[in-house]
Amino acid sequence: MAENRILFLAPASIPVNVAEAIVNVKLLKLLVSKGYKIDLISKKAKWEHYPLTQEEELQHSLESVTVIELDNKISFKTAWLHLRAWIRFGVVFKGVHWAFVASKVASGLIKKNRYSCVITKNYPSELAGYWLKRKYALPWVATWNDPYPHERFPEPYGKGPDCVLPLFKRPIIKLMSLYPDAHIFPSARLRDYMQGYLKAKAETLYVVPHIVESSGQPRVNTDDGVLKICYMGNLDGPRQPWTMIEAIKCFVEDNKHVPFKVDFIGTAPQTAESVVSREGLSEYIRFFRPVSYNESLKLLLQYDVTLIIEAPCQEGIFLPSKVSDAMAAGIVMFAVSPSAGVLNDLFKNGIIGYFADVTNPESIKSELERLVGDFSKGALYNTAIPVDYTPKAVGDMYDMIISNVSV
């Protein structure tokens, strides 16, 4: 194996200001701790979901870090880079120019170093991975944390797995199917969803959950008899707070004077606070601005329960990074998610303690009543970190995959 050196292409990694970056940085830290030498090619995001978190220690432990900063605004330079990307990859779409520039940077690194493989994380890094595979015969490990291309996200995010792609994006499916030496998915449901149109060789498919390592930090025990629930993240897209608010209203009407609070920490619709005020729920529901990822982990320890809300998809194929954060903190989880999906699977397997259908306010209200009842008895349901999620298990899986593709 080429000095256990990896070329790691992750547009979302450093700087850490989106959920994907958090997942990828955890993996980078794990691989470095196992002795892999890593050259990282990343992207400077023009937007962020979280205030910036610095990762100076990680940057120093990597062999090299290249952060590519590009503009998506229409200009001669942007148009020229998109044209060159189309010539190189055979596809074109907004933002594809990052893959072209990344492939040039990667070429320069390959001329200096020998690599075991290239690992791609997040769009459009897969195009660079494909080109490096073809040009240099470099083994390619493709990671899919979300469906790809974006049009094939499930509704309401996209148009479903069978939608017809725009003409200039259609070749993507073929290159995704034929060229990776390994495909990694965080859940079996996402694997099966994407395999429906990938049709990749079964022996190249792997399921590797997000890494979870106990924070070792004790929960802040206020012991004031108030059940404290928090939601960390954004609720201004397909994920929305309205069904949860409706359920809380019904719960309060039937259970007056129950001491509980639900704090939403992150971006929410502008009208949310006014709706809560109008419904007389300000005593129970509060909204706070987003905080950095590291700060969110500290805040999490001040609550009894973390709330995980997903969009009303027909099937919940995602494994939100919030799940691994909750496992690491040892905090009880209440998932409000599609009735068929990854989070309900975790609930049925005893890993998530409380679950309700995201489309059904009555289901949410009923589970909230169970939650409050368990809290009053000092019997909130929680569980240990599943073995498959531990750094050792994830690290062993990556060792196996990298070894397999590097032979």
Image: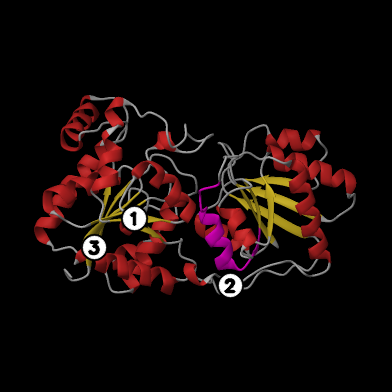
- State the residue position of label 2: 217
Which percent across, then down, holds residue 62?
28, 65
- Of discs 2 and 1, which sits in the foreground? 1
Q: Are marks 2 and 1 in contact (CB under 8 Å)?
A: no
Q: Residue at x 43, y 46 (%)?
A: 146
Which percent across, then down, holds residue 369?
81, 54
| Image: 44 above or below 111 | above
Check disc 1: other Cα within 10 Å, few if <14, some if 14-19, many if 20+: few
Q: Residue at x 24, y 47 (%)?
A: 178
Which percent across, then down, holds residue 280?
83, 38
The amino acid pointed to by label 3 is Val
The part of the image, by quadrant, that contains residue 70 is top left
Q: Secondary structure at mark 1?
A: helix
Query: How far apart are labels 3 and 2 at the CA level?
Result: 38 Å
Magenta extent: 316-333
> Which of marks 3 and 1 precedes in the sequence?
1
Query: How far apart are labels 2 and 1 at the CA level?
Result: 41 Å
Q: Are marks 1 and 3 in contact (CB under 8 Å)?
A: no
Q: Quadrant of the C terminus?
A: bottom left
